[in-house]
């Protein structure tokens, strides 16, 4: 009976134990076993999904773990700020697997161990290095110090140097290689940020300082090596002006200084006009017997400032420490030297002649004609150039040798310096007309002048000038130069303009003058002259009728094609006769007729 009772008790206990075990396993089938905690947080009996809300990041992730030391301050950094975070799902999955062994016996042993001793599971953390890099890059912006290049400034004429200063920047990758091991091991650490020096681009300004001091060490004097009498110069540029031309530039890692060549050039270009001497072409006569040119005045070379070469010389002189240097001038050869031959320049043919007569001219007018004609004798006009009568005539003044004589001025002739010069412009016009040259400016007289119609001159073939507004101009449209030769008959009072060039076969036809709009002058003018002898009277000017004269010119080339067709219209006003009388003379009461 005792054995049977013992069997029943053992059997009952066994059934109870198995039932308890089965009930325990059934209860904890989807729960974490008792005794399991994660860094002190008890999770036993909880479903993994429910345990997630209880599982917070451990203090080691939320509290400063690493101290970063910079050049002038430190930062205490939490692991989570550097990309270290709790992997909740992986941590709970690991906690759930504790006690679940492949065999029942081993599982029972694990359960008993967990119940007796428990298990504090470390959390599983994940490290995102990109977060750590972003954190350090943000620090880098605060730590960055840009380098300062060496510089040079000018206080007046004194160069002042600011030395270069190196900059700094955080080496993010090198610092990250120190942070990552301490972070992933959750080991407290003090780490010095890895800083690197950033050198300046321009490290030296002392050499530029020395160069500026040399450039401004006194005035710079410019001279002409071989000046002529009356030449300007010398020119002295004080340091206060030179400093405005100083150019500081970067070469490699250093500053250098010199005078700005563009500034020097601008300075010299302002001097250049005063140094120009225009070359003088020779003047010639054409010897028709030999068909050669005979110089009647020598040619002379001209001169001009060579700005580019002068700039180079000034720079070289200053680099050598010289304070005096000469400017470079270039010789300018004349277009037509006195050694030129007729064949070389193409002056081989008489291409036209213009003539007029001034018989009976007063002495002053006679003198002025002869003087003005010399201004044009021997001139050579290059191909394509426009001839200006006033340009070659020059000033018409008493100082230039001209006398007073009659000039056309309003209703009555007046006395003026240079009277008669229009005889010369009229003759030049006629030579250009018969030479077939394009006449770009020509003015007719306000009234007819008898001198211009002497010996077949014809009405409408005159040209008046009055500098600077009224001019005679024509273009040398031939391929060869034009030689102008003048001649004044001593006793014949005949003025001739001869044009020599190369005959290109052109032919000139003239039609007219066609006269129209003829008008008669009004009654004569009587004017009192207090300085005249009492009771005397003289005829001051004769009456001349008015009219319009129209002349046409056709210029044909060698093939018969029209080169130019011109119409020259001259509108002459009538001029009344005029008498000047002295005190006591009684002018006639009937002045209807002269």
Image: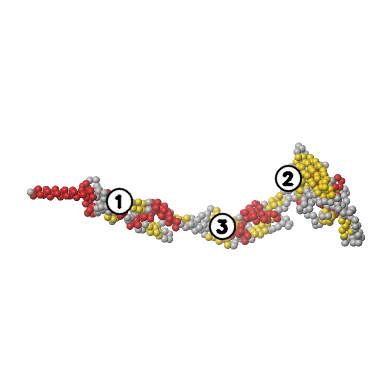
Q: How is the image coloured?
A: secondary structure
Depth check, mark 3 against mark 1: the one in front is 1
Within 10 angstroms of label 1, few (less than 14), some, or many (20 or more) residues? few
Within 10 angstroms of label 3, few (less than 14), some, or many (20 or more) residues? many
Q: Are marks 3 and 1 in contact (CB under 8 Å)?
A: no
Distance CA(mark 3)–CA(mark 1): 76 Å
Secondary structure of the residue carrying numbered label 1: helix
For residue 236, above or below residue 507: below
Q: Residue at x 84, y 46 (%)?
A: 458
Q: Residue at x 50, y 58 (%)?
A: 148
Residue 507 placement, left or right of 102: right
Residue ranking furthest to the right? 535
Q: Earlier in the sequence, mark 3 or mark 2?
A: 3
Within 10 angstroms of label 2, few (less than 14), some, or many (20 or more) residues? few
Please tell me in which quadrant of the rendered image residue 579 appears.
Answer: bottom right
Query: Which of 236/194 is in front?
Result: 194
**Mark 2 lies on residue:** 384
Distance CA(mark 3)–CA(mark 2): 54 Å
Which label sits on residue 49?
A: 1
Q: Are marks 3 and 2 in contact (CB under 8 Å)?
A: no
Depth check, mark 3 against mark 2: the one in front is 2
Q: Earlier in the sequence, mark 3 or mark 1?
A: 1
Residue 373 placement, left or right of 233: right
Q: Position of residue 562 (x, y in %)?
A: 76, 40
Instruction: Count every numbered label the image shows and give the total.
Output: 3
Residue ranking furthest to the top? 559
Secondary structure of the residue carrying numbered label 2: loop
Which label sits on residue 208?
A: 3
Distance CA(mark 2)–CA(mark 1): 105 Å
Q: Position of residue 540 (x, y in %)?
A: 87, 55
Query: Which of 6/507 is in front?
Result: 6
Q: Residue at x 43, y 54 (%)?
A: 137
């Amino acid at each position: 009976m005792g054995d049977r009772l013992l069997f029943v008790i053992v059997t009952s206990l066994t059934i109870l134990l198995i039932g308890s075990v089965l009930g325990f396993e059934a209860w904890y089938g989807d729960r974490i076993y008792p005794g399991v905690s994660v860094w002190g947080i008890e999770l036993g009996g909880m479903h993994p999904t429910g345990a997630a809300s209880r599982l917070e990041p451990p203090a080691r992730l939320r509290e400063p773990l690493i101290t970063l030391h910079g050049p002038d301050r430190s930062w205490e950094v939490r692991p989570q700020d550097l990309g270290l975070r709790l992997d909740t799902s992986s941590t709970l999955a690991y906690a759930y697997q504790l006690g679940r062994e492949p065999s029942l016996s081993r599982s029972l042993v694990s359960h008993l161990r967990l119940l007796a001793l428990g298990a504090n599971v470390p959390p599983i953390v994940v490290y995102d290095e990109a977060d750590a890099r972003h954190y350090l890059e943000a620090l880098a912006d605060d730590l960055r110090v840009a380098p300062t290049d060496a510089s040079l400034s000018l206080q007046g004429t004194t160069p002042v140097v600011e030395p270069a200063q190196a900059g700094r920047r955080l080496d993010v990758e090198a610092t990250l290689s120190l942070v990552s091991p301490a972070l992933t091991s959750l080991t407290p650490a003090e780490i010095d940020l890895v800083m690197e020096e950033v050198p300046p681009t321009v490290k030296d300004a002392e050499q530029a300082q020395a160069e500026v001091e040399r450039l401004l060490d006194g005035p710079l004097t410019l001279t002409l090596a071989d000046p002529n009498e009356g030449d300007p110069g010398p020119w002295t540029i004080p340091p206060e002006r030179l400093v405005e031309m100083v150019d500081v530039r970067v070469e490699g890692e250093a500053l250098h200084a010199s005078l700005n060549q563009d500034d020097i050039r601008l300075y010299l270009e302002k001097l250049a006009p005063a140094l120009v001497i225009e070359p003088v072409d020779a003047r010639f006569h054409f010897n028709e017997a030999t068909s050669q040119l005979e110089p009647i005045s020598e040619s002379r070379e001209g001169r001009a400032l060579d700005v580019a070469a002068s700039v180079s010389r000034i720079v070289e002189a200053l680099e050598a420490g010289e304070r005096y240097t000469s400017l470079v001038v270039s010789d300018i050869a004349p277009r037509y030297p006195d050694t030129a031959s007729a064949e070389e320049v193409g002056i081989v043919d008489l291409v036209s002649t213009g003539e007029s007569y001034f018989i009976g001219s007063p002495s002053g007018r006679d003198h002025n004609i002869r003087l003005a004609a010399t201004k044009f004798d021997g001139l050579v006009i290059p191909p394509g150039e426009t001839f200006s009568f006033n340009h070659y005539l020059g000033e018409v003044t008493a100082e230039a040798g001209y006398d007073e004589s009659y000039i056309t001025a309003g209703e009555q002739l007046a006395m003026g310096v240079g009277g008669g010069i229009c005889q010369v412009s009229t003759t030049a016009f006629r030579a250009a007309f018969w030479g077939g040259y394009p006449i770009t400016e020509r003015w007719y007289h306000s009234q007819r002048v008898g001198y211009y119609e002497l010996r077949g001159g014809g009405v409408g073939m005159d040209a008046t000038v009055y500098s600077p507004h009224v001019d005679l101009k024509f273009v040398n449209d031939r391929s060869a130069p034009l030689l102008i030769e003048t001649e004044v008959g001593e006793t014949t009072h005949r003025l001739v303009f001869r044009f020599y060039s190369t005959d290109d076969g052109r032919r000139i036809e003239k039609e007219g003058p066609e006269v129209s709009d003829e008008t008669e002058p009004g009654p004569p003018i009587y004017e009192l002259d207090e300085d005249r002898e009492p009771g005397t009277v003289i005829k001051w000017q004769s009456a001349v009728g008015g009219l319009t004269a129209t002349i046409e010119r056709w210029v044909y080339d060698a093939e018969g094609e029209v080169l130019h067709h011109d119409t020259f219209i001259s509108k002459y006003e009538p001029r009344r006769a005029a008498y000047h009388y002295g005190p006591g003379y009684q002018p006639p009461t009937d002045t209807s007729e002269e």
